[in-house]
Amino acid sequence: MHTIFVMIKCELGQTYKTAAMIVDQVDEAAEVYSTSGGYDLLAKFHLDKDQDIGRFVTERIQTLPGIKDTYTITTFSAF
């Protein structure tokens, strides 16, 4: 399993609707948080080892309604 974090900018007024959509429609979503600052949401996803991170983000996350921009953080080892 591979864990990634995706910081998400939402269209104005769409943050809560977008967060609910991620939780309801994306099976790989582990946690979704509202944040302050340059991004509106921080989402944690668990992907299968053979799952392509770039395709997952661009095809499954960035295409959801209400998402304006993303920033992806990949992880390596847990301590």
Image (cartoon, rainbow, N blue to C red):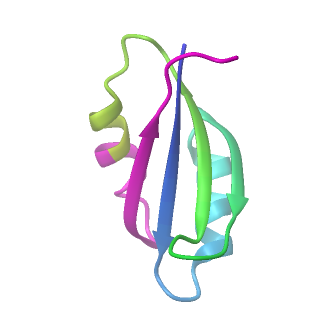
Q: Is residue 74 magenta?
A: yes
The answer to which quarter of the image holds residue 50 is top left
In the displayed structure, 8 sits above or below 23; it is: below
- In the picture, the quarter occupied by the N terminus is top right
- In the picture, the quarter occupied by the C terminus is top right
43 on left or right of 73: right
User: Is residue 75 or residue 64 the one in the foreground?
Assistant: 75
Q: Position of residue 43 (x, y in %)?
A: 60, 49
Q: Residue at x 68, y 73 (%)?
A: 16
Q: Position of residue 3 (x, y in %)?
A: 55, 26
Q: Position of residue 48 (x, y in %)?
A: 48, 15
The answer to which quarter of the image holds residue 19 is bottom right
Residue extending furthest front?
Answer: 79
User: Is residue 76 or residue 14 the one in the foreground?
Assistant: 76
Q: Position of residue 31 (x, y in %)?
A: 71, 43
Q: Residue at x 56, y 41 (%)?
A: 26
Q: Residue at x 28, y 35 (%)?
A: 55
71 on left or right of 45: left
Residue extending furthest bottom?
Answer: 12
In the displayed structure, 70 sits above or below 39; it is: above
29 on left or right of 68: right
The answer to which quarter of the image holds residue 67 is bottom left
**Boundaries of the magenta span:** 58-79
In the displayed structure, 74 sits above or below 71; it is: above
How many marks the image carries: the answer is 0
